[in-house]
Image: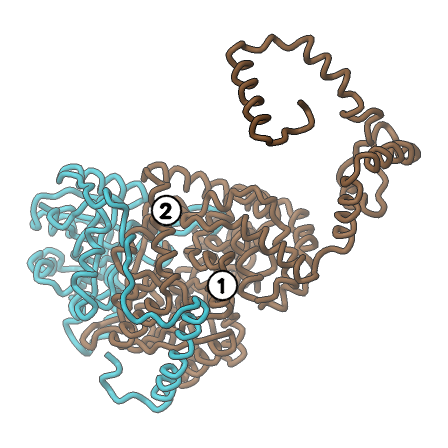
Amino acid sequence: MNPAQSTQGTVKERAGVALNNDFLRNAVKFTTERLRSGKQAASAEHGNWEEWRERGRQIRLHTIAHLDYYLNLFVDNARKNGVHVHFAPDTAAATDIVMTIARNKQAESVVKSKSMVSEELHINRALELAGIETIESDLGEYIIQLAGEGPSHIVIPAIHKNRYQIAELLSEDAGEELPPDTTILAGYVRRKLREKFLGADIGMTGCNFAIAETGSMVLFENEGNARMVTTLPKTQITLMGMERIIPSWEDLEVMATLLPRSATGQRLTMYMSGITGPKRTADGDGPEEMHIIIVDNGRSEQLGDPEFQELLNCIRCGACLNVCPVYRHIGGHSYGGTYSGPIGAVLTPALNRNVAEWDDIANASSLCGACSEACPVKIPLHDMLVYLRRRKVERGHGNRWEALGMKGFAVLMANSKRLNLALKMGRIAQKPVVHNKGITLKIGPLKGWNTYRVTSPMADHSFRENWQELSEDTRRTAPPMNAETRDRMEQILRQRRASGIQGGHHE
Amino acid sequence: MSNSQSTPDWLNKLEEQSRISQQAFIDNISTRLRRPRMTEAPDHPYRGTPALWSEFEWDAQQRIDKFTTHFQEVGGHVVRLQTMEQAAGFIADHAVQMNARYLIRQQQPELAELRLEERLPDVQISSWNSDPDEAWKARAAEADIGVVMADGAAAYTGTVMVTSTPHQGRSVSLLPTVCIVILPVDRLYTRLGELLIPMDEIGREHLPAGMHFISGPSRSSDIENDLTIGVHGPGIIYTLLVG
């Protein structure tokens, strides 16, 4: 999907760069911790959070399971509202439609509000190649656009930049020195973008939710820029992932409860806007012409796949990023795709249909499950990461040494005599490389581990060899077993013998 | 709507393409879901919020208290007033205090009755979309203060709702530096759902083009997590709770 980024080495290499950047690590840690505790407070304040999560999950599951019906219903209703609806199976088709509209409108400038789909499509690049000025209007997006970077967090795109770096970027943009003061910097962007909003030919937005029964689109935001984009330019283009649908406004109450609380810990974002068609003829503002481009770009491949269909339930809140111990250390750009964190690790290979090329991001996770626990619609993200790893191995993209190691392990473990012999030999063989009770050798398979740690040598006597002594020790010092417990356990043992089930080896 | 005029050729062509792609696009979804295309509305047993939520309701005083707390917590201002006359006085006093030169209001009878023009002779006051030749977006953009009526509000999230009509511009609550929303107390409900569910009931044909749910001043934390107020929309927002 993103050749420019994907060719820049592996996740490990990109993370190496990120790990050397102290500011990035601290900023990401600080912000994600704030968002995470905000979410915890907001979900606790709301109460019955589990019940709401389950409801959110059911609504998303239901919609996706009947997506053909609901998407078609949405399209019919949006058309009746006067919207021009378009279908884009892939990036090329979506770009083509946008460019056709821009060309025919003789557009000189486009103002955009935050849209992850447009990042996915790299639409800015296409517009700029055609000589059309394209301005990101979300404060964070504007900053990273000036820096020529992609977003490193779904909700806070410029999480990795400090105020001095931002002051430098904005000063260059302004042609005058701006102090690194948040209020002054934001004030500059407000003034600058006001002119852009009022002068732009096309407003481009994403879409948080699309209401099937009325053909409306819903946007959540805090700055007011999405309202500007949908109010001032004469033409509006909305890029919408095909799975953004929910059936009704009634269902929106559940999403409006889950999304802001999970994303930023807010009761509701400062603005939530429902747009139903272009402006009515007599209205004084709003777009005269409205286009909605429904984008597939790999999404439909998840349908009918029992392991990944639930990926389409995602409401893009970013809660999984904020709790992820790996994301917090390496930051968003290390993931190399449009979407970062646990959701990115699963979504990027899924949307790109190239598990092999992206396989290493599936490994950028400790599988601790914090992401699944945080997800407001209960997507089992850490299970999906395991499925991805399995698919990678099944498709022959596994690590040869790992496979060989596993085979050797199987041979050894199959026979206790063989294992004992190997352990004895190991104890002798390690002698030359043990120094100060540790192995520091950085060759072969030990290189990765020993670069940061010291391998413990094998003990002189194994646990098994010490068992006799250990068990006598335990028997001597353990308090006598409660008579009732003993009776119960003996009864279980008798039952087991009677039913013919063999116990373990420790009878 | 734009399509009431003659549609240009390129748009007709896009439209034609769209209807062809629609078939393939939706069929692909059905195929992937491994069943024939679904054309009847499926049973949706989980529609809306968990069951008990719809019974949750605060009494009038609680609604006022909670709305006030929630709106103020995020940086908005709430003023409790008894009459529209008091609201008019509040707006006039504030306009003078803030040295406002331009004020724009929605073209609504309740707002006309405030007689702001008489109260503020030195302020240039305009009424949204009252003259077809005026550049209304520019008028709203230059305004120091925008005055709107709320169509509804939810105390639980601290949210006011404004909708668009020919006489109610989206720009009036968005472009001025200060936004003043007048909320009659009988339009203040407990839950957001009490504002959303009527949208389903009203039905597609009767929905306004723009519905905006506003919960406080425009804000951003995009620079080092430092909260900034008034990034694109109004940095100062008052809700005058009247009645």
Residue at image location 15% in from the left, 42% down from the top: B80
Asked which secondary structure carries label 2, the reply is helix
Residue A166 in sight: no
Front-most of residues B75 and A248: A248
- The color chain B is rendered in: cyan
Using the image, determine if residue A478 lies above or below residue A128: above
Q: Quadrant of the C terminus of chain B?
A: top left
The quarter holding residue B156 reads: top left
Asked which secondary structure carries label 1, the reply is helix
- The kind of residue on which mark 2 rests is Glu
Chain that bears disc 1: A
Using the image, determine if residue A43 lies above or below residue B2: above
> On the picture, is B133 further left or further right than A423?
left
> What is the crowding at mark 2: few (fewer than 14 residues within 10 Å), some, or many (at least 20)?
some
Front-most of residues A226 and A475: A475
Q: Which chain is brown?
A: A
- The kind of residue on which mark 1 rests is Gln
Q: What sort of colour scheme is used for the picture?
A: by chain
Q: Which residue is mark 1?
A: A302
